[in-house]
Image: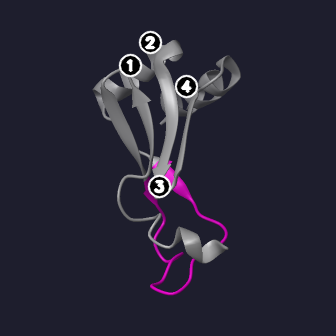
Amino acid sequence: VLNQFIGLTEGKAIYFEIEDQKVYAEFETGREESNKISSVHYIQFNFNAAAKAAFLENPESVKLIINYKNYTYSETINEGMHKSWSEDLLSS
């Protein structure tokens, strides 16, 4: 089952969408090979100043999106998630 996700760490399959901006996930290297993939991945999102401001100022427009092969998911983040991630952004 896991091998279906080989290639997930390449490209732009997971991202935040804030209004007209996208902030793509950056995967830790070394967790995928051409014939196998780890069940655990570490990702980070590097926000530029404009994306950070949009995230902090427009919580109702922040979506987390996954778009990989035959799987697509989009969720507007809830207030608790926004508060927690905003604290992370402000401390970085």
Q: Which residues are magenta?
A: 26-44
**Mark number displayed over residue 33:** none
Give the label on residue 57, or none.
2
Element class at badge 4:
helix
Asked if marks 1 and 3 touch (Cβ < 8 Å), the reply is no
Q: Nearer the viewer, mark 3 or mark 2?
A: 3
* Figure check: 54 above or below 74: above
Residue designated by label 3: 68
Q: Looking at numbered disc 4 in the image, what kind of residue is underneath it?
A: Ser
Task: In this rendered view, identify the residue nearer to me: 75 or 86.
Answer: 75
Whether the magenta-drawn stretch holds residue 42 is answered as: yes
Query: Tags 2 and 1 in contact by the CB under 8 Å rule?
Result: yes
Q: Nearer the viewer, mark 1 or mark 3?
A: 3
Q: Earlier in the sequence, mark 1 or mark 3?
A: 1
Identify residue for label 4. Answer: 86
Q: Position of residue 45 (x, y in %)?
A: 44, 45
Question: Residue at position x 41%, y 31% from top?
Answer: 17
Q: Which residue is at a point 60% across and 26% down the rendered structure image?
A: 77
Q: Is residue 69 visible?
A: yes
Q: Which mark is residue 54?
A: 1
State the CA–CA distance, disc 4 to disc 1: 11 Å
